[in-house]
Image: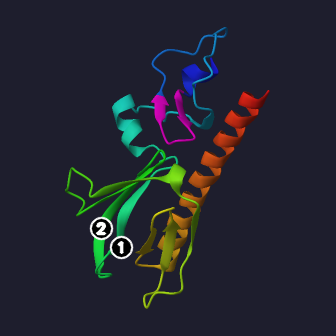
């Protein structure tokens, strides 16, 4: 009854699922499912297609950031998308192929960066390179840092759980 009236659920990685049928009481759950983080009621009179695009985004973010180049060290505006454990950047919002996809499982830190001549900057530390990014506002930079740090904490938690399972 509960899921029949509140069929929108979401996981840690940002995947949203609208249940088309009420959830059965007795179900064998495979361990590969992601844990549920959000559970939202549908609004009266709305259809599934109305609801999903307007549903809250979970663990995903997108927007323009200014990125420092690897070799020339010039700054270019790029469109960034964060989904699951990948941060991709594109030439602009209309581009379909990313310039690069960064695997966050390889990222060791995300922090504010005050070494640049710009404001609202932060960096992502990878084994082979540190990426320097700047947002338009301090609030926007803080939002990126918070969600990226949350992603890293989720990745570490999953690794710890896997290691604990393997060692037992």
- Residue, x 55% and y 66% (percent of image)? 145
What distance separates the C-alpha of mark 2 from that of mark 1?
7 Å
Q: In this view of the protein, can residue 31 be seen by the observer?
A: yes
Helix, strand or loop at mark 1 = strand
Tell me if 30 is positioned left or right of 59 in this view: right
- Residue, x 43% and y 88% (percent of image)? 118
Instruction: Give x and y (percent) for residue 53.
Output: 37, 42
Label at residue 67: 1
Depth check, front residue: 20 or 113: 113
Residue 13 is inside the magenta segment = yes
Q: Residue furthest right?
A: 168
Find disc 2 in the rendering and name its residue. Answer: 78
Instruction: Give x and y (percent) for residue 151.
Output: 57, 52
Residue 56 is inside the magenta segment = no
- Residue, x 20% and y 55% (percent of image)? 95
Depth check, front residue: 37 or 96: 96
Q: In this view of the protein, can residue 47 be seen by the observer?
A: no
Mark before the other along the chain sequence, 2 or 1: 1
Q: Quadrant of residue 52?
A: top left
Label at residue 38: none
* Label 2 environment density (alpha carbons within 10 Å; few <14, some 14–19, many ≥20): many
Instruction: Give x and y (percent) for residue 132.
Output: 44, 74
Helix, strand or loop at mark 2 = strand
Image quarter hosting the C terminus: top right
Instruction: Give x and y (percent) for residue 33.
Output: 57, 26
Q: Quadrant of residue 100?
A: bottom left
Q: Is residue 133 above or below residue 147?
A: below
Report the span colored magenta. 7-17
Tell me if 51 is positioned left or right of 58 in this view: left
Instruction: For the residues labelled 2 and 1, say whether their Cβ atoms are less than 8 Å apart.
Output: yes
* Label 1 environment density (alpha carbons within 10 Å; few <14, some 14–19, many ≥20): many
């Amino acid at each position: 009854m509960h899921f029949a009236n509140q069929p929108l659920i979401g996981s840690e990685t940002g995947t949203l699922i609208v249940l088309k049928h009420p959830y059965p009481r007795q179900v064998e759950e495979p361990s590969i499912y992601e844990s549920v983080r959000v559970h939202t009621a549908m609004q009266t009179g709305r259809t599934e297609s109305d609801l999903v695009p307007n549903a809250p985004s979970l663990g995903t973010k997108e927007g323009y950031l200014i990125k420092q180049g690897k070799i020339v060290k010039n700054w270019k505006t790029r469109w960034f998308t964060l989904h699951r454990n990948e941060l991709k950047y594109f030439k602009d919002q209309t581009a379909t192929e990313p310039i690069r996809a960064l695997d966050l499982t390889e990222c060791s830190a995300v922090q504010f960066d005050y070494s640049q001549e710009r404001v609202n900057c932060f960096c992502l530390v990878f084994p082979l390179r540190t990426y320097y990014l700047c947002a338009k506002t301090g609030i926007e930079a803080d939002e990126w840092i918070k969600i990226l740090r949350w992603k890293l904490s989720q990745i570490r938690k999953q690794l710890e759980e896997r290691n604990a399972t393997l060692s037992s």
